Amino acid sequence: MDTALRIVWLVLRRVARVFRDAASWTVQSWRAALICLVIGNVLLIADHEAAGEAAMWCVLAWNAARAVWRAVSPLTYEAALGGPLRRRGWRRRGRKGWSMVAERCGLGMRSERPKSPTVVPRLLKVTTTSNALVLQVRVTAGQTVDDVDQVADAIATAFGAESVESRRVRSGVAELVLTMRELLHQITTAPVPHDIETEAVTLGRVSNGSPWRLELNGRHTLVVGRSGAGKGSIFWGVAGNLAPASRAALVRLWGIDLKGGVEVAVGAGMFSSVAMDEQAAVRLLRALQRVIVERQAAMRGRSRQFEAGPGDPIHVLLIDELAVLTAYASRDVVNEASTLLKRILAQGRALGVIVVAFVQDPRKETVGMRELFTQTIALRLASSAETRMVLGDGYGDLAPAHRIERTMAGAGYVVKDDGAVERVRADYWPDDVIRMVAQVYPAPQVPIDGDDGAVMDALQPAKAPDPVEPRPRRQRSPRSPRPAKDTEVA
């Protein structure tokens, strides 16, 4: 009985949506409906009843057919009719409304002559993507691309966009990407990886729907976000996508989780070694420092860039809650761990030792080596000041990570190498998927023992050549004293 009532309720909701869509589209196209009504009455007066009736009801019939099509097959409707019509409306709105919007947002410039017209940046190109309106404009004399960047948020609000990304195309030309439909609200679950990747991993999607690829080769990554911002999605996105390469001995994963191992323990099988207390974390950092020293000796005079191989893998260190290790631990541990981590960050990038760290508080007192990370990801933050700390000065308005909704876990901002800002969202990793990946791609275990943090034989690092011992100095026998000569006085 409950199943039948549920089916009836779903059918009634679908029928109500059809009537609502048909009525809404008819009201929106009231001009066309009025014209068809006049033409239909004229045809009726001229004794053309069939043509008159068809003309009077054609707009309503067309909208009703659209509504039924959308309810029955939304995917085909979106691809064939809904999407093209919506994007055509965006382009029309952008062309017709640009002059007024630019003037009201402060981009208009008026000459000193009386009654001179207001000059606004010239609209060069209007294009659309699946969910965005792209406006390419050339600034007027006396303006720069930065002036457009400062009012980008106001322009997005005027056009009814969800968000905006501003980028410099060339000298004097700026491009505004207005996200008209938000695609990042929907949560997507990460699939089980199959490809062997060592230089970059696919973590989720960008605001335009394309895959989000995070570069790892030669880069240290710092992920900053408040509690519940979705740092775990990026943590397991990196570890899970590198698990096939770890199984193939091309990558070796190391983990530090000083929150009792709550995060890492779910998929500990992906890691070669995991540190869950302060002393183990320090020993693991010593081991990675030892790898750097030995690779420096092996590469000196031969190569400047490390190339991974089955016997000499890339080492990727993932640190969950970096502040526990560098600020909240005991003083001796903080001092030694901070020193070792700074050395690894400064020297390990070109030697195949990569660090991906996660933290909630981005202040210098907590993360003293913040400037040593070559790329940062800003998830949901507390204030605009924290956004500037993470992404840099000038990005408080371009990448407002402090305005991300609490319900959008895993969403954030990334600044690309060319300065462009990307809105991204990482895929969600359930515990079942994490355990499955750890079971399918188990990593060879490499325990880190000893007070000196020496790497075990399973690492197989390249050894430095033995130093040449100096030749022992020959011991010379003492010289016998010469006999004194007798002097005679004549």
Image (spheres, rainbow, N blue to C red):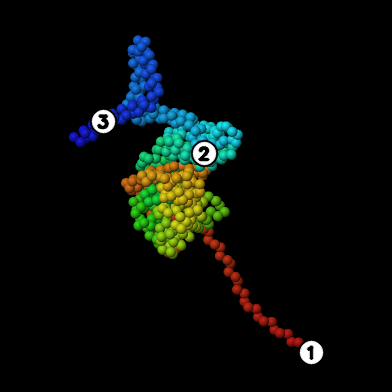
- Where does the image place residue 450, in percent across and percent down from the top left? 41, 63
When the figure is inspected, residue 91 is found, relative to residue 266, above or below; the finding is above
| Residue 196 in view (yes/no) | no
In the rendered structure, which disc, 2 or 1, sits on the residue that comes first in sequence? 2
Task: State the mark number for residue 106.
Answer: 2
- Position of the N terminus, as image quadrant, is top left
Q: Please tell me which residue lies in front, 143 or 440.
A: 143
Q: Residue at x 40, y 19 (%)?
A: 35
Disc 1 marks a residue whose amino acid type is Val
Cα distance, mark 3 to mark 1?
146 Å
Q: Residue at x 53, y 32 (%)?
A: 124
Q: Please tell me which residue lies in front, 145 or 113.
A: 113
- Position of the C terminus, as image quadrant, is bottom right
Helix, strand or loop status at disc 1:
loop
**Residue 256 vs residue 106: left or right?**
left
Residue that numbered label 1 is attached to:
489
Residue that numbered label 3 is attached to:
12
**Residue 84 vs residue 305: left or right?**
left
Q: Residue at x 59, y 37 (%)?
A: 141
- Where does the image place residue 64, in percent across and percent down from the top left? 33, 24
User: Which of the two discs, 2 and 1, sits closer to the camera?
Assistant: 2
